[in-house]
Amino acid sequence: MNCIESVNELLIQPLIADEYGLENLFAFKVEGVEMNRVVLPGSLAIVHQTNEWQDGKIVAVRIDNKRMLFRAWREDEKVLFVPESRDVFLRSWVYDPSEGLDVEILGEYIYSVNFAS
């Protein structure tokens, strides 16, 4: 899954480290195009590991062992996931926990680093 569980080895902005605590941050390489208008594929996404997020914020989501980014809004017990992609075929979708899909919201996206030259 290309996930870095400990971000101690990464260059984290000091204000971010102070606000969230290094132990509450993780990073993963963005491979999909779900949010490519905001975060380029290949970037390293820095995420605050939490079960709480503000509606309309970008969240890291695990779907069938694949990590992705989406904007998310709560709708009662359901969650609306909205991509911001240049791929016109990607659509918003509603996650309903009662459907038994393997989906987990991992935390709120903070920022990304792109190492491309």
Image (spheres, rainbow, N blue to C red):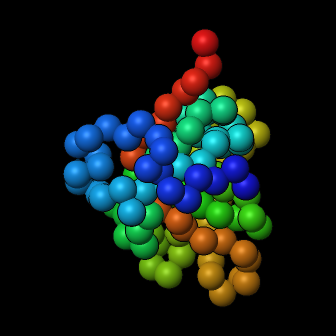
Q: Nearer the viewer, residue 66 or 10?
A: 10
Q: Nearer the viewer, residue 43 or 3?
A: 3
In screen coordinates, is 45 left or right of 13?
right
Residue 67: x, y in percent?
Answer: 66, 55
Q: Nearer the viewer, residue 75 or 54?
A: 54
Which quadrant of the view contains residue 81? Answer: bottom right
Residue 79: x, y in percent?
Answer: 53, 69
One can see residue 107 in this view: yes
Quarter the N terminus occupies? bottom right
Residue 88: x, y in percent?
Answer: 71, 34
Which quadrant of the view contains residue 64? Answer: bottom right
Q: Residue at x 44, y 50 (%)?
A: 8
Q: Residue furthest top?
A: 117
Residue 49: x, y in percent?
Answer: 44, 64
Up the image or down, 14 lies above or below 102; here it is above
In screen coordinates, is 35 left or right of 46?
right
Q: Residue at x 52, y 43 (%)?
A: 45
